[in-house]
Amino acid sequence: EVQLVESGGGLVQPGGSLRLSCAASGFSFSSFWMTWVRQAPEKGLEWVANIKQDGAEKYYVDSVKGRFTISRDNAKNSLYLQMNSLRAEDTAVYYCARLDYYGWRNYAFDPWGQGTLVTVSS
Amino acid sequence: QSVLTQPPSVSAAPGQKVTISCSGSSSNIGNNYVSWYQQLPGTAPKLLIYENNKRPSGIPDRLSGSKSGTSATLGITGLQTGDEAAYYCVTWDDSLSAWVFGGGTKLTVL
């Protein structure tokens, strides 16, 4: 069974740091782009970051550039999100998802993990 | 303000049909594939439609997707109370070099 399990969320003060992890199983992790998507309380979904199979390409939403770093360890089938200089507006459930490939420039987010809650508050 | 525009809410009676629109521009929907996701309350999103109009295995043919120009549409027929959820469209934006989501549409089955 294809599965993604996030961990590492919690309560952190503004300006603090947190590292999220996503453990993948049931598929060839090193063959897929991976992504983080977040959802603030009672709000919609927002893409956060992407990483290529070998980690050589990374993309970020403007609001987290310079503060968040996406990385992966293919040997451990794991995806990470290092979050620094956290702000109240980063409070959200963070989901990891696989970018399933269907052809040239043709991807979809499938599957998704269950999410981990990050709360930034003093 | 989302890059892709969806109606905040739609509603219809059980058994009826509903459509959810997703409007974008030439840099996103107009030049890229659209996917659709369902998010039931308290759960993670789930892929419903990819490549504008294709359904993954296990998704019933009551659900359909289409795209024309810079807009996409999700259709659901034979509405059931279990369809009550939020629905999101997603595509890549070439100008932003970013994945962009619609603001989400809450479906109520009256």
Image (cartoon, helix red, strand yellow):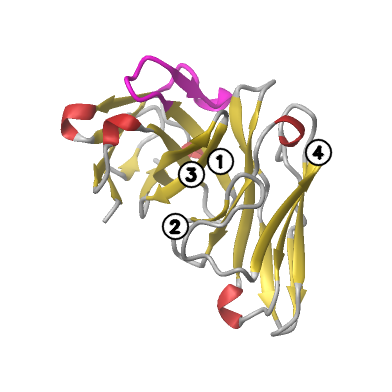
Tag 3: residue type?
Phe
Q: Residues within 10 Å of mark 4 (few under 14, many from 20)?
A: some
Q: In this view, which residue lies farthest toward the front? A: A103
* Rendered position, B13 above or below A5: below
Using the image, name the chain to which the residue with label 3 belongs. Answer: A
Tag 1: residue type?
Glu
Task: Identify the residue at image location x=42%, y=30%.
Answer: A86
* Discs 3, 2: same chain: no
Q: Looking at the image, do the residues carrying marks 1 and 2 touch, with CB atoms under 8 Å apart? A: no
Image coordinates for residue B99, horizontal then vertical, percent: 58, 33
Q: Is residue A18 visible?
A: no
Q: CA distance from mark 3 to mark 4?
A: 21 Å
Q: Nearer the viewer, residue A94 or A92?
A: A94
Task: Identify the residue at image location x=22%, y=27%.
Answer: A73
Image coordinates for residue B74, horizontal then vertical, percent: 70, 58
Label disc, if present, on residue A109 of the rendered structure: 3
Residue B101 is drawn in which quadrant? Answer: top right
Using the image, name the chain to which the residue with label 1 belongs. Answer: A
Of marks 3 and 2, the one in the foreground: 3
* Discs 3, 1: same chain: yes
Tag 4: residue type?
Thr
Q: CA distance from mark 3 to mark 1?
A: 13 Å
The range drawn in magenta is: A51-69
Tag 2: residue type?
Ala
Q: CA distance from mark 4 to mark 2?
A: 27 Å
Of the two numbered discs 3 and 1 on the same chain, state the one appearing first in sequence: 1
Residue identified by numbered label 4: B70
Label disc, if present, on residue A46 of the rendered structure: 1
Q: Nearer the viewer, residue A88 or B14?
A: B14
